[in-house]
Amino acid sequence: MTETQMIVTIGMMVLGTMFTRFLPFIAFPEHKPIPKWMVVLGDRLPYASLGMLVVYALKDVNVLSAPFGLPELVSLALMTFVHRWRHDTLISIGSGVSLYLVLVNILLK
């Protein structure tokens, strides 16, 4: 990649980042109400994306050979419990990922 190509690439990345950061403020100014469809999307999209992440994370689990998906199941159970208890997504995901890493790298090695 030449120096000119690098400068153009970095410039395009800067413009793309600025566009995605400023677009919500341009499309939905503060003095106008947010459209109903956007409010509905804002309410439902986080749950849909988390569901998609769970499916993606569990798609390659082999329940027919050891450890039979046990680390994933235990970690998912902990995440669910912590989220129901604390109602904090960051804590629940962090605890589940931490437990999964401990199970896979230390206990099941």
Image (tube, helix red, strand yellow):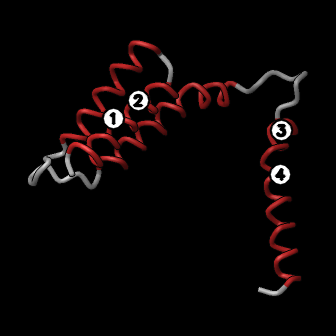
Residue placed under numbered mark 4 in the picture: 19
From the viewer's side, name the closer residue of 64 and 105.
105
> CA–CA distance between discs 1 and 3?
42 Å
Residue placed under numbered mark 2 in the picture: 95
Q: Point out the frontmost of discs 1 and 4.
A: 1
> CA–CA distance between discs 4 and 2?
35 Å
* Residue 83 sits above or below residue 54 on the image: above
In-image side of 35 versus 86 (left or right): right
Amino acid identity at mark 3: Ala
Circles 1 and 4, Cβ within 8 Å, touching? The answer is no
Query: How busy is the neighbourhood of tag 2: few (under 14 within 10 Å), some, or many (20 plus)?
Result: some
> CA–CA distance between discs 3 and 2?
37 Å
Q: Where is residue 103 in the image (x, y as percent from the top left)?
A: 26, 41
Circles 4 and 2, Cβ within 8 Å, touching? The answer is no
Circles 1 and 2, Cβ within 8 Å, touching? The answer is yes
* Comes first in the chain, label 3 or label 2: 3
* Comes first in the chain, label 1 or label 4: 4
Residue 10: quadrant of the picture: bottom right
> CA–CA distance between discs 1 and 2?
6 Å
Q: Point out the frontmost of discs 4 and 2.
A: 2
Residue placed under numbered mark 1 in the picture: 99
* Comes first in the chain, label 1 or label 3: 3
From the viewer's side, name the closer residue of 41 and 64.
64
In-image side of 66 versus 81 (left or right): left
